[in-house]
């Protein structure tokens, strides 16, 4: 019986582990991937984390993990298949058939890349279609690629790829970008980036690998075909809440409904990081959630002695 089980070892989960261990809680973190770290692992450069401008995302994630390790946090590598609420007892089941008990849970599984759902996307995944420019960009050195999206991640990807790709098309369905102004300035200073405004990607084509994409302008002009070797899709995220939707209240987008105290609709279960409803999803807010969630866990445990 643990005081706390944390599901997910991204910034929110690791922050919760640090605060939980410092509070003397008997806790365990369950993470599906061996390394953990969440989305930050795939970020080439983090320039807005306080006191660490320009830090590599992988390095930052490793610092988070080392901090939790140094405090004696227990990590379990496994895939959670079920979460049950039995009043003061919470049950977590994993794919290997194991079952773990805790008095409280912090759900910190984050979110995953949203899909376009267009022909060719699934077929060419890993064969020219990618959702991580920093992971796969190096394979396209001196080649032509396309990035789909208009937010911070899409613009960051386009700027990053422009460093070594011959040509980068940024395809956006609107006539203005949603990305931060500082990122837009970097983008527009890249001579080898072409923004394709008011257009949607409708099809990805090729034989064994991606060879071209089809773009449909919103103004009704004829469909346009672009020869590219790679397509990087950055059109948002989807919360990893499928396991919890029958148990916990979610909003219309599937995010767990939880306020700044991270408390969900079930007492003793808390949500931290990108998995919960919030106005801003950043590393710093995920780390903050980890601390707030543990504070709420402590108050809950104190009131349920």
Image (tube, rainbow, N blue to C red):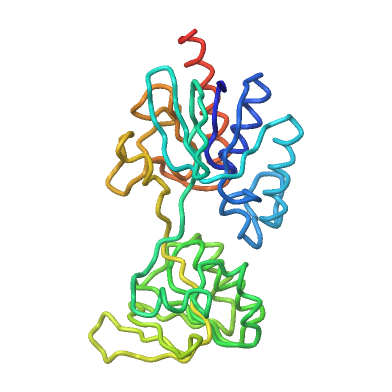
Nearer to the camera, 128 or 44: 128
- From what the image shows, is residue 305 above or below residue 250? above
| Residue 217, x across and y down, in percent | 30, 83
Q: Residue shown at 56%/48% (left/top)?
A: 32
Q: Position of residue 271 (x, y in %)?
A: 45, 34
Instruction: State whether residue 238 is above or below residue 133.
Output: above
Q: What's the residue at 60%, 76% (across, down)?
A: 161
Residue sitting at the far top: 305
Q: Is residue 22 left or right of residue 295?
A: right
Q: Quadrant of residue 257?
A: top left
Residue extending furthest toward the left: 220
> For the N terminus, which image quadrant?
top right
Q: Residue at x 60, y 31 (%)?
A: 28
- Residue at image coords 41%, 41%: 278
Nearer to us in this view, 274 or 220: 274
Residue 166 placement (x, y as % from top left): 61, 87
Residue furthest right in the image: 70
Q: Is residue 238 above or below residue 213?
A: above
Question: Residue 129's x, y, as percent?
Answer: 49, 76
Image position of 143 (left or right of 203): right
In this rendered view, identify the residue nearer to me: 99 or 187.
Answer: 99
Q: How many marks?
A: 0
């Amino acid at each position: 019986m643990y005081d706390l089980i944390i599901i997910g070892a991204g910034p929110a989960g690791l922050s919760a582990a640090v605060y939980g261990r410092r509070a003397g809680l008997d806790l365990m973190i369950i993470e599906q991937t061996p390394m953990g770290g969440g989305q930050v692992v795939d970020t080439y450069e983090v320039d807005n984390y306080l006191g660490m401008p320009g830090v590599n995302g992988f390095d930052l994630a490793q610092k988070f993990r080392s901090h939790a390790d140094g405090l004696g946090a227990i990590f379990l590598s496994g895939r959670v298949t079920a979460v049950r609420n039995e009043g003061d007892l919470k049950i977590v089941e994993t794919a290997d058939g194991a079952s773990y008990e805790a008095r409280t849970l912090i759900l910190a599984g984050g979110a995953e890349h949203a899909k376009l759902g267009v022909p060719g996307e699934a077929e060419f995944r890993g064969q020219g279609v990618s959702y991580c420019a920093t992971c796969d960009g190096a394979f396209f050195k001196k080649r032509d690629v396309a990035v789909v999206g208009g937010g911070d991640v899409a613009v960051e990807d386009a700027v990053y790829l422009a460093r070594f790709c011959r040509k980068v098309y940024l395809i956006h369905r609107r006539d203005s970008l949603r990305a931060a102004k500082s990122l837009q300035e970097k983008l527009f200073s890249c001579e080898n980036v072409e923004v394709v405004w008011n257009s949607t990607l409708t099809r990805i084509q090729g034989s064994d690998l991606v060879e071209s994409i089809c773009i449909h302008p919103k103004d009704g002009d004829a469909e346009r075909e672009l020869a590219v070797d790679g397509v990087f899709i950055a059109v948002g995220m989807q919360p990893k809440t499928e396991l919890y939707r029958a148990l916990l209240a979610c909003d219309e987008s599937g995010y767990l409904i939880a306020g700044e105290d991270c408390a969900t609709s079930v007492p003793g279960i808390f949500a931290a990081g990108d998995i919960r409803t919030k106005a801003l999803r950043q590393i710093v807010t995920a780390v903050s959630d980890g601390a707030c969630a543990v504070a709420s866990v402590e108050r809950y445990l104190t009131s349920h002695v």
